Image: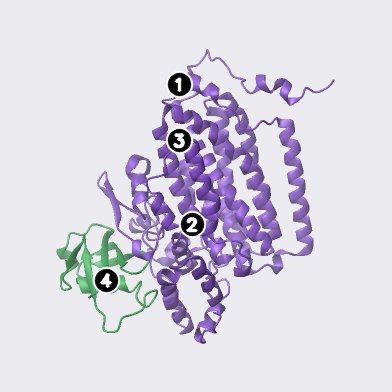
Amino acid sequence: MVMVPIYGRFIGDFAAHLVAVDTEDTIADVAAKIAAHSVCRRLPAESAGSYEVLIDGRLIPPEVRVTQLSLRPLHWIDVRWKR
Amino acid sequence: MRLLSRDDWYEISHDLDWTLSYVEESDAFPAEWTGSSGVPKAAWQAWEEPFRVSYRDYVGVQREKEAGVAGVRDALKRAHIYEHLDPAVAAISHFHMGALCMVEQMAVTMLGRFARFAPSPRWRNISVFGMLDELRHAQLQLSFSHDLLKHDPRFDWCQKAFHTNEWGILAIRNFCDDWLLNANCVDAALAVHLTLEHGFTNMQFVALAADAMEAGDIGFSNLLSSIQTDEARHAQQGFPTLEILMKHDPQRAQRVIDVSFWRAFRLFQAMTGTAMDYYTPVDKRKMSFKEFMLEWVVDQHERTLRDYGLERPWYWETFLKCLDHGHHALHLGMWFWRPTLFWKPNAGVSRAERQWLNSKYPDWEESWGVLWDEIIRNINNGDMAKTLPDTLPALCNLTQLPIGTHWDRHHLERCESTYDGRTYYFDSDVSKWCFDLEPARYAGHLNVVDRFVSGLIQPPNLGGALAWMGITPEVMGDDVYNYRWAAEFNRPATRDT
């Protein structure tokens, strides 16, 4: 288990954030960690809403773990509401 | 004996120079400092002062200005004006004293460099007066703040701010280290005199002085006006430099002005945009930041470009669109990360204020109101933790400002460059362009997030970051009206709001 600092942006919010993720986190965990800085703080929650994650423009399945990705420090990760 | 009049001796004295024999010209005036590479030495003989002044004239005029400021200062002390100021108006002076006083002191160093290394004796002579101007500005702000220190410890930050790592101050210092302290004379004259002073601060001081006077902060208004009279004079020194560079290296002139204009604008969004559109009481505002920029900065900058044969910057359309948004983003960010400030920000989003914002910025509600609505909901539900940050925002490696604050939330794009194996992030394609033009100039610098991630800030949490920034409990930012403005959103809106 190793902490990896990334830049997380929840699409629709006005800022991206420094977020610490763990190599054992799933992408669903990462999405929740990024969303926690935006949703219910500046963006309203969406009932029954769930998230999806884009890294370098690619949609990443929620079950993938961080350790399976080649993330560099401060890698940029986008999260958005699942359409 | 009758003193000679200025015109009897000026023509001789302003060309006072030495023919060097013991040292090489290039050792006494290294091109790295003069900035005269690409311009023949003889070309500098055409450098004409935009104004003429002798030491005797200068001292006489400045003495009168000082007497005027001192008179107002004494009268205000007796009238206890500061104690009756709206707290949001007082916050403007806390912010501006901390943000600007040491910039004036850095300008002393820059003008001292001009007085020694500028490639024309006329330029060197006239810079001595500019140096004295800037000394006066720094000292005025320190003495003004010293008077008010007994009312608020935040005035200590007039001197202290630039000796801390407060993130906003680091952004200003980054610009000033680059252009005021390290650029050669020619580049610095274009970036600072022509762009920052003539283009922005000169006008900013006019606007803020007017707003401050209207809001009752007579001392701050008087201080700004007195400084502005000096700025208006010495800022003109950029024009003869531009005129010569346009004949010999117009591409360089265009580059320096385009880069410094963008960087100065980003800082103005943070400082002037927030003060004009959020901190000044709504009934005291004379114009919006956008209106002010269009009337006083944009027109003037376009005129300068046109008069000297320069093109508009390639990013002009982006810049104009950013006028509608970027300072709202910076304001929201500064308010949300308020514990990282040394002043108390005013949210400025009561119903009446929102009505004003929507009248000036038709997209405000859709871009910014929705974000404030969630904050207001949390305040009114007593969930204050959700109105405060748990982490740092992503920061631009050029401007040092939060990524996402140049425009609006719909234009937050990932912008990055890789140089020497490291990835650098930027707040906009314009900042990325600035970096890509001269990557070695900026590479290697660590912004606050980079330092946090590198373990240079301990303990590695928000408390550690605040301690590293020098923020102490007695100055730590909080909502200036203690959130009272949010209560009206618990009630239905009346028809006129």
Cα distance between the residues tagged 4 and 1: 57 Å
Chain A: what color? green
Residue name at image x 46 percent, y 25 percent: B30
Label 4 is placed on what type of residue?
Arg
Which label lies toward us, 3 or 4?
Answer: 3
Do pointers 3 and 4 mark residues of a single chain? no
Position of the C terminus of chain B by quadrant:
bottom right
Label 2 is placed on what type of residue?
Gln
Q: Nearer the viewer, residue B302 or B208?
A: B302
Q: Are marks 2 and 3 in contact (CB under 8 Å)?
A: no
Label 3 is placed on what type of residue?
Gly
**Helix, strand or loop status at disc 1:** loop
Residue name at image x 56 percent, y 43 percent: B198
Do pointers 2 and 3 mark residues of a single chain? yes
Q: Nearer the viewer, residue B112 or B269?
A: B269
Which label lies toward us, 2 or 3?
Answer: 3
Which chain is in purple here? Answer: B
Label 1 is placed on what type of residue?
Pro
Find disc 2 in the rendering and name its residue. Answer: B269
Label 1: chain?
Answer: B
Q: For mark 2, does the 10 Å Cα neighbourhood hold few (<14), some (14 to 19), or many (20 or more) residues?
A: many
Do pointers 3 and 1 mark residues of a single chain? yes
Find disc 4 in the rendering and name its residue. Answer: A80
Q: For mark 3, does the 10 Å Cα neighbourhood hold few (<14), some (14 to 19), or many (20 or more) residues?
A: few
Q: Position of residue B336 (x, y in %)?
A: 45, 69
